[in-house]
Image: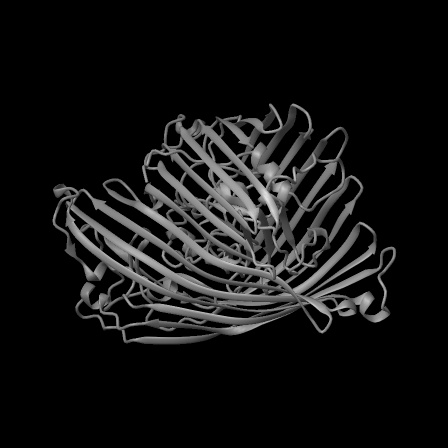
């Protein structure tokens, strides 16, 4: 794929739940509008967020499609940055990770079309990275965010929460006439000289439906704010392209959907792992996902039963290159993880007992890793020498997880009285459980003995862990439009291959595989809140408490009596680190969001989230990378059927984060220079002001424009390896036919 091709970026400000305030433009049902699809909620029903007993945020279907048109962002990470209670950290320009209730990295589960994305090869931090930017933003048609552990209908590991993304889906309808549609979008962003473009096409005839999309983008080095003299930050540019192909068939007893989606990043630099004369680059980083999905409805014992079954295969691959000028050496690594997944879900309406959901999910994972060295001055054609000691994982490492789940969504008033509550007094319960196992196999590992001949050879390992989660949430609506929610949940994250077997030399030090088996992380969470959706006001306030047992942390270790070893650069003594279970830690979270609909399409929106971790006797945080208090506020004007149909003034802000964990002092995204409390004071706060607008030239064509960071402030999101963009403009053109 040519690396100068363009692409599309999309995004939008998050909504809490649907509200009935003004009529939207009628949908053209004569076209296969895939954006009419919605994300399945945690109850496996298409309920609104207000109706859910859990703490949830969502944007679906037409609402999301409108947001993506009027406020385009360059990536999925940027798309979620304005969602309530979501904090997006950016280690490098091409990587974005979400943090929910103070827990991020591998502790946030990321699903695309019901398939969980792997995090095995993407980070030196515990748990890997839930890299949002490996999903093509133009294909996203629905977002649902569930905060808190114990989401039984999806996989283990989402201790902070789960993000569900729904992408394009061809919708086949039997006996439909020939229907065709197409779209194109282009976006230009000035801070990084980004040029992005995308084209889509869809068709439907009789029992068949097709959907295709292609996007490409090229970003130059991003320019920071006034404190950096508005200069470009070196090594932040990269190229990217995405491809989507989908086929849907109406079988008469349901629909069968086959999808392939892939994305590639080219020539990206991991800025947080690079320094003068020692550059860590990613010539190619890719994700591919293919799946076959069946959706149908049958009748059993006189009741309808919904059936969903998916078989998937995904691959994440990475070609990395580390170049050290001082010793004339180049290290190239090729790492790949392949995952075969199967899942099935059933749901039935039990009448007076509510709806019952049950299912099964399993994933099989294989990792391959090779490393080669060469002399830097020989260039790309130089002789490559195998370097087994630098391989990231022992070849042949594999993992397997499986789990069964059961969940019941019960209307308690109807269950006991046999009738619906007529005016208020509604009481619902959401109860679920999940159980299964996780297994790791790691072959005999001689890499440590190659680094230090006196070190032991690690024996073959076969580890098994139980996985489980459970939750009970209640929702009581005393009067129409006002609801109180409360509940508790528990969940586990078993150690992954990345936690156990990774060997990696780079900032913050030399990461060694574990020599003592790790225990699973366990999260116990409780939450309580109040919600309203009444006339022109909607909002919620939630308090949550999370206790994390056996957190997997990065700690200093010794190897053959040494606390550091000569690193790949041949000069410095890299500190030795490994993953180990820490002591119990607790988090207290407060989340609030409100939207007021005023008049003539004018509305105001605001959200704030704050998580406070426990501290040690010396005042340090017990958990790393916890975001500071942060929020978003906006005033919007929307008139969908007018020419000047959207104007938004948005403020995004975050407070300072001075409360650091010991692990934060080694983290180059937080303390990039000296790992010492005396020289690292965390991340300062900021406030950004942006103005966005959209002009509806016709029913099919829309022009968007925005000025971001109007005050040209220099800022950095806590846990990010680069400064945010300075003042800049975005221009976009969207056409759909």
Residue 597: quadrant of the picture:
top right
Looking at the picture, how far across and down is residue 223, in whole percent?
40, 30
Asked whether 211 or 510 is in front, the reply is 211
Asked whether 400 or 171 is in front, the reply is 171
Q: Is the N terminus in the top left, top right, bottom left or bottom right quadrant?
A: top left
Looking at the picture, how far across and down is residue 669, in whole percent?
40, 46
Looking at the picture, how far across and down is residue 220, in whole percent?
36, 32
Asked whether 139 or 253 is in front, the reply is 253
Residue 594 visible from this viewpoint: yes
Q: Indicate whether 243 appears above or below 192.
A: below
Q: Indicate whether 523 appears above or below 63.
A: below
Specify whether 560 is left or right of 441: left
Q: Residue at position x 41%, y 71% from top?
A: 518
Looking at the picture, how far across and down is residue 228, in whole percent?
40, 29
Q: Residue at position x 26%, y 73% from top?
A: 444
Q: Residue at position x 33%, y 63% from top?
A: 367
Residue 388: quadrant of the picture:
bottom left
Residue 630 visible from this viewpoint: no
Labels in figure, total: 0
Q: Indicate whether 450 appears above or below 381.
A: below
Q: Residue at position x 79%, y 62% from top?
A: 427
Q: Is the C terminus in the top left, top right, bottom left or bottom right quadrant?
A: top right
Q: Indicate whether 231 appears above or below 374.
A: above
């Amino acid at each position: 794929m040519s690396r100068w091709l363009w692409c599309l970026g999309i995004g939008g400000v998050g909504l809490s739940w649907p509200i009935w305030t003004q009529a939207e433009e009628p949908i053209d049902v004569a076209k296969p509008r895939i954006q009419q699809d919605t994300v399945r909620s945690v109850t496996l029903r298409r309920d609104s967020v207000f109706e859910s007993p859990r703490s949830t945020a969502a944007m679906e279907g037409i609402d999301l499609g409108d947001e993506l048109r009027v406020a385009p962002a360059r990536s999925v990470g940027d798309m979620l940055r304005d969602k309530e209670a979501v904090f997006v950290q950016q280690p490098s320009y091409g990587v974005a990770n979400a943090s929910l209730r103070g827990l991020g990295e591998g502790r946030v589960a990321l699903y695309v079309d019901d398939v969980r994305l792997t995090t095995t090869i993407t980070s030196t931090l515990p748990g890997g990275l839930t890299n949002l930017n490996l999903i093509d933003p133009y294909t996203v048609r629905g977002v649902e965010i569930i905060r808190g552990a114990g989401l039984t209908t999806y996989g283990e590991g989402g201790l902070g929460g789960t993000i569900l993304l729904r992408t394009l889906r061809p919708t086949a309808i039997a006996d439909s006439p020939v229907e065709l549609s197409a779209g194109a979008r282009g976006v230009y962003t000035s801070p990084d000289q980004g040029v992005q473009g995308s084209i889509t096409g869809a068709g439907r005839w009789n029992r068949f439906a097709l959907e295709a999309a292609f996007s490409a983008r090229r970003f130059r080095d991003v320019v920071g704010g006034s404190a950096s003299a508005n200069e470009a930050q070196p090594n932040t540019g990269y190229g990217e392209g995405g491809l989507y192909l989908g086929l849907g068939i109406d079988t008469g007893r349901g629909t069968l959907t086959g999808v392939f989606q892939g994305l590639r990043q080219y020539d990206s630099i991991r800025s947080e792992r690079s320094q003068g004369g020692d550059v860590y680059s990613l010539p190619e980083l890719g994700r591919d996902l293919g799946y076959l999905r069946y959706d149908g409805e049958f009748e059993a014992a006189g009741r309808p039963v919904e059936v969903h079954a998916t078989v998937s295969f995904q691959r994440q691959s990475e070609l990395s290159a580390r170049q050290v000028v001082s010793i004339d050496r180049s290290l190239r690594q090729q790492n790949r993880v392949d995952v075969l997944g199967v899942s099935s879900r059933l749901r039935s309406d039990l009448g007076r007992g509510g709806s019952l959901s049950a299912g099964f999910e399993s994933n099989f994972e294989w990792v391959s890793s090779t490393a080669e060295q060469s002399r830097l001055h020989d260039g790309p054609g130089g002789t490559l020498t195998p370097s087994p000691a630098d391989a990231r994982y022992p070849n042949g490492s594999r993992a397997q997880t499986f789990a069964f789940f059961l969940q019941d969504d019960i209307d308690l008033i109807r269950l006991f009285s046999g009738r619906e509550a007529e005016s208020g007094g509604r009481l619902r319960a959401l109860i679920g459980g999940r159980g299964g196992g996780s297994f790791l196999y790691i072959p005999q590992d001689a890499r440590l003995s190659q680094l230090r001949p006196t070190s032991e050879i690690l024996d073959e390992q076969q580890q098994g862990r139980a996985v489980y989660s459970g939750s009970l949430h209640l929702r009581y609506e005393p009067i129409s439009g006002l609801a109180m929610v409360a509940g508790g949940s528990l969940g586990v994250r078993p150690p992954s291959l990345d936690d156990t077997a990774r060997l990696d030399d780079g900032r913050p030090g030399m990461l060694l595989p574990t020599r003592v088996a790790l225990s699973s992380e366990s999260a116990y969470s409780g939450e309580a809140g109040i919600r309203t959706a009444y006339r022109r006001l909607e909002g919620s306030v939630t308090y949550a408490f999370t206790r994390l047992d056996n957190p997997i942390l990065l700690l200093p270790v010794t190897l053959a009596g040494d606390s550091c070893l000569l690193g790949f650069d041949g000069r410095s003594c890299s500190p030795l680190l490994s993953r180990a279970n820490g002591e119990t830690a607790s988090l207290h979270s407060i989340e609030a969001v409100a939207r007021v609909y005023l008049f003539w399409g004018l509305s105001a929106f605001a959200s704030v989230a704050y998580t406070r971790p426990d501290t040690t006797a010396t005042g340090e945080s017990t958990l790393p990378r916890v975001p500071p208090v942060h929020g978003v506020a906006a005033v919007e004007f929307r008139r969908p059927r007018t020419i000047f149909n959207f104007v938004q003034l948005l403020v995004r802000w975050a407070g300072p984060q001075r409360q650091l964990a010991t692990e934060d002092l080694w983290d180059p995204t937080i303390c990039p220079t000296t790992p010492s409390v005396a020289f690292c004071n965390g991340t300062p706060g900021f406030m950004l002001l942006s103005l966005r607008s959209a002009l509806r030239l016709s029913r099919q064509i829309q022009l968007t424009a925005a000025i971001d960071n109007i005050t040209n402030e220099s800022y950095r999101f806590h846990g990010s390896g680069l400064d945010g963009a300075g003042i800049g403009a975005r221009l976009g053109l969207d056409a759909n036919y």
